[in-house]
Image (cartoon, rainbow, N blue to C red):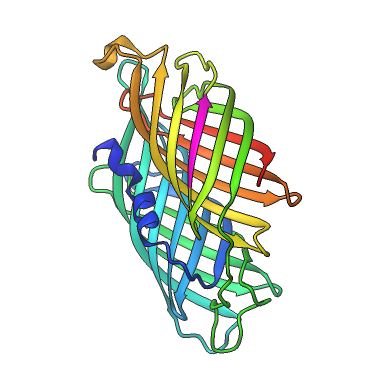
Amino acid sequence: MTHPYLSRLPLVCLLGYVPLSLHAQELTLFAGAMKATDIKQSSYSYQLEYRQDFYQNLAASVAYLNEGHVPEHHRDGYVVEAWGRLPTPHNHFSISLGAGAYFFYDTQVLPTGGSADVHGTAPILSVTGTGYLSNRWFYSLALNQILPAHELKVTTATLGIGYWFGRNEKPTPGQFGHGLDEKAALTGNELTVFAGQSVVNTFRSQSARAYALEFRRGIIRHVDWTATFIYEGNPEIVRRSGLALQGWAVNNFFQDRVTVGIGFGPYIYIDRKHPADAGNINPAAITPLASLSLSTRLTDRWNLRLMVDRVTSSYNRDADIILLGLGPRW
């Protein structure tokens, strides 16, 4: 088991290598099944992947992976992989091999009847087969092999539907998955009011109404920063609120009308229900906050934004915060 803060390294790495000139982009939603070989149990699995091509046959991806629920384990996390595309006879189907790291969060049953949030890192090996259904829509078959040293070893098999965000309508002959560069505008000022739900990562999944207020501004193209006040509500076992300061890797599509982003930074909070047996009765703390964001520009002045936050705790109180927000841009 690794230190919980190391679970956020994929996002740090992504922020470190974001290029200012980007090529083709693919966003894919997968769903299927998983099998835990250690305990001979199976469940559902789903995955949301963003893949970025850098050369004709080389790519990198960031994904959220959920391994479903097997007895005493609810595991999910982030995946960072490098991909190599194998040569194929034509440009309407491709096979890719991937390898990387899986930064996971596993909610496990404690002998006392409670739950523990176990954080760790595992190697992951993947293979995908992708074919195009139309100019922009494609399907993909994916197999993942997750190989942690001391936790559950898992195989997932999923079928996905994806969308091509490249500037041209579809890959050109000899350049499968390699679109033209898009010039993204620098993000201006945005103020967004959010409402949604927080869910604590326990076997009871306690939830509550959550709210947030975010100010966003671009630093350079493809890099934003945000300051966000978050109120996680009162889901029985936590009552957290605080300020998050994040850096963002963002990409823009369709003349900047749609953006996809990944953020990481410190979350400075107060938990008025911090358990005394956690070894620290001080309700104030700081923890990493990782976030995924998708926004669309409704008009020249108004944005609609979906936000998914993951709070990492050191006292078995991890949480997901799902928010939808509306706000002006200028």
Please check the rendered image and state whether residue 28 is part of the magenta-colored stretch, yes or no: no
Tell me: residue 122, above or below residue 284: below
Which residue is drawn at the image coordinates 62% and 67% (left, top)?
A: 165
Which residue is drawn at the image coordinates 41% and 29% (left, top)?
A: 318
Please check the rendered image and state whether residue 230 is part of the magenta-colored stretch, yes or no: yes
| Front residue of this view, candidates 217 and 314 | 217
Whether residue 218 is visible: yes
Tell me: residue 160, above or below residue 208: below
The spot of residue 145 in percent (x, y) is: 37, 57
| Front residue of this view, candidates 228 and 239 | 228
Left or right: 248 in relation to 25: left
The spot of residue 303 in percent (x, y) is: 68, 45
Which residue is drawn at the image coordinates 59% and 28% (left, top)?
A: 197
Where is residue 306, by image quadrant?
top right
Q: Which residues are magenta?
A: 225-231
Tell me: residue 292, above or below residue 186: above
The spot of residue 188 in percent (x, y) is: 59, 50
| Front residue of this view, candidates 53 and 87 | 53
Residue ranking furthest to the right? 299
Whether residue 43 is visible: no
